[in-house]
Image (cartoon, coloured by chain):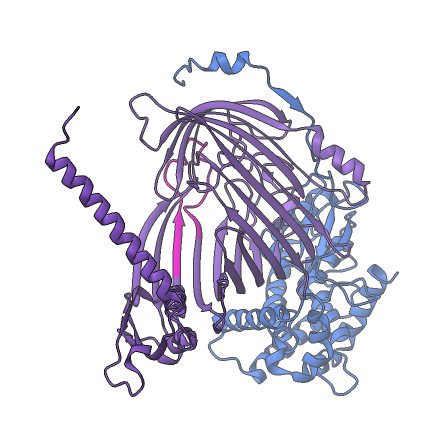
Amino acid sequence: MGIPNPLKKLQDALPLVRYPAVYTPPIWPAEPANIPILFIFPPSKQAITSLDAECVKYQAFLAFSNYEHVTRECHEPEMSPSGQLPFLMAADGRILTGRQIIEEVKDKAGDLESRLTDAERSNLTAFTQLAETKLDFALNYTFPPQLFTMWYDSRIRDRITFPMYESLYPWPLNKILSRSLRSEKTEWMLSRRAVLKKDEILDDAKRTLAALSTLLGSQLFFFGSKASFLDAVVFSYLHIILSLLALPSHEVPLREAVMKHDNLVQYARRVFNTFFAA
Amino acid sequence: MEQIPPSAASGTDAIFEIQRESRRLKDLVTNSQERALHVNSIRIEGVEHTRRSVVEALVKPILESQNLGDIVAESREACQRLGRLGVFRDVGVTLDTPTDSFGASGELVDVVLTVKEGPRFYARTGADFSNYDTTTNVTTKISNALGAGECLEANASYAVQPSVALNESAAAFTSETGSYFQVLCSKPLIPTPTFKRPNRADPDARIEFAAYSTNRNMLLHMSHEEQAKGLAARYKTADPYYGSHEFAYDVAWRHLHNVAQDGSWSVRQDAGHTLKSAISHIYSRDHRNDPMLPTAGSYVRTREELSGLGGDVKFVKGEAEGQWAFSLGNGFTLATSIRGGLVLPLLGQRTRVNDRFLFGGPNSIRGFRQSGIGPMDKKDAIGGDAYWGAGLSLFTPLPYLVDKPMKGHFFVNSGTLVPINTGDTVQQNAQRLIASPSVSAGLGLAVRFSILRLEMNYCLPLAAGMTDRIKPGFQFGIGISYM
């Protein structure tokens, strides 16, 4: 209980004129109203999948789940509450990232994995983990959405990374930011591994791809005829590796490793044509 | 008939004597001004760290003097120029007969300039407290670093939130509200003087280069932090009568980050990195007898900024402020002030949250919370593109405290802050600017401290927008600039 304020009466006695607000914030940041928006790193021209594997992953997952949404381009990870793209603006205005997006989609569009057996579920978790670490590492090492390649593969840098990032920020901010992102990425990788050895990373990726190829076999998706979260994860990496690392001048070892598994290549093509080709 | 006392008679005589003598001296000086006299040499004594070439260039015109009057005037001006270097604590002149003159000794004179250099190193630590935080700061300064009045300065300050946020509801904010680091190098620009009668003194000019890094926590009225790192070059002239100018170029890398989970979309969409590259000009003229609590005089300040010379932030911005104080006699003072500002995006851009104006609070429109006027999104004050404010204050003497820098204070404040919609016509935007002025009135105390003014007011908002955050009741204000 507050101390009674004798001046309160005076305040109340004086009339306070209230005008309508000078500004009403838009109810929804983009048309059409109240359709969830997935904010993704910009795709290349005439493409609808983002250039960033993490964004493709969620694009695929939302597409698999038949979750009604629109995508918007965004190159500022800082806009996301987690500091990482993508993020989803749900129909009620909440802004979700990572795990929250999966929960939201499961909640609204149904669980893709409800039909799976317990054994399949644990398989899914294990393979997701495997793909997200090994393939992500290999991809980051060879082609980094966050400009990491600049250190390691000048051909990729000049053909892909530079044109992709230079336009996002004005000079000289693009140089400074790419440098700091690069060192951030290196630090992140070094926190996982003591030594960054190209062959080791590539071998890990090769083993992972072989395991995934075996799991897939001749099935439509990894767990039968319907897509799961693992499909989203694997597709995102395969798609980026196959499409972005396709250089006319030379073959990137990671892409070569994928090309060896015919069923994975077919799989990536099939998923893309089914869910993303206009 | 009255008899004049002898002492009085001699006193009158003495006064006459003094008057006669002073007239004689004046005549002597006046007559001898035209007397041909040449400078044999200039001696400068007391120079330690200052480069001799710099000092010599400033005193050289004395050599061209042809008579005593010129010598005196030129020496005086040379002293002023030396003073403007900001290096010497005091400068004196003596005229001396040359000891080894070969010419006619009567026509030659030595000019002796005695100077004393001030201390070169300066350090200061302090704690200030402003509206919503307390600040600790450190300043170190090396004057006359390279011997021509160059000044190297480093500032660091770190602000923290006091445990009780001065009468405002203590929302959950982190304790650091900002930090500020700056390295500054400045140099006086004094044009090479020439012998000229009459010699109009050039205004003081300085050139300044600064590198800075700031971090500001905006969580009090918005939901993000802003980091900025930048370089600035400034050219400043100071003229106390006609006003001072500052031309600046500033390039800043701004990083808007740490948007709160429940932050509004208006703030969130501006998160990330931007590069601002801008030229600006500030004009200010302060004729007030006391900047903190004036009783007479006027103050005018304008600022224009054009951003978009490279970088990705393009806008044009203008602000103006004026203050006039009139003494009403018996210690009563009437002070009026107006201010206004406009920012317009260029080349189809929209304005960003860190380029827009914020308005309201104890230093502008009292009776509202800090940045409590204008466009809001959720709980964020997202700023507006145009504002105006006007204030009328009556300062009264206080019983028993007539000669103290403490006054009673009655005020009426009014103002508004609106977004500019580039799709609307000028009339529509102007209409919005005058449609809903927030108004408050109140009374309280105003106290002047050496460099700031403290106010304690009882405020009553009389008109406010629906989203404005009013703060009826007691409000505490500390600041250096008030409306």
Residue A256 x/y as whole percent: 72, 83
Q: Residue placed farthest to the right in the image?
A: A278
Q: Nearer the viewer, residue B61 or B100?
A: B100
As drawn, A22 above or below B25: above
Whether B77 is drawn above or below A104: the answer is: below
- Magenta range is B155-178
Residue found at x 72% / y 56%: A61
Nearest the camera: B470 or A69?
Answer: B470
Position of B79 with respect to A67 (left or right) is: left
| Chain whose colour in the figure is blue | A
Give x and y (percent) for residue A212. 68, 70
Residue A207 shows in the view = no
- Horizontal side, residue B413 vs residue B154: left or right: right
Residue B347 position in % (x across, y down): 77, 57
Residue B350 in sight here: yes
Assess whether residue A197 is covered by the magenta stretch: no
Q: Quadrant of residue B333?
A: top left
x%, y% of residue A218? 79, 69
The chief SS type of the magenta part is: loop
Chain B display color: purple
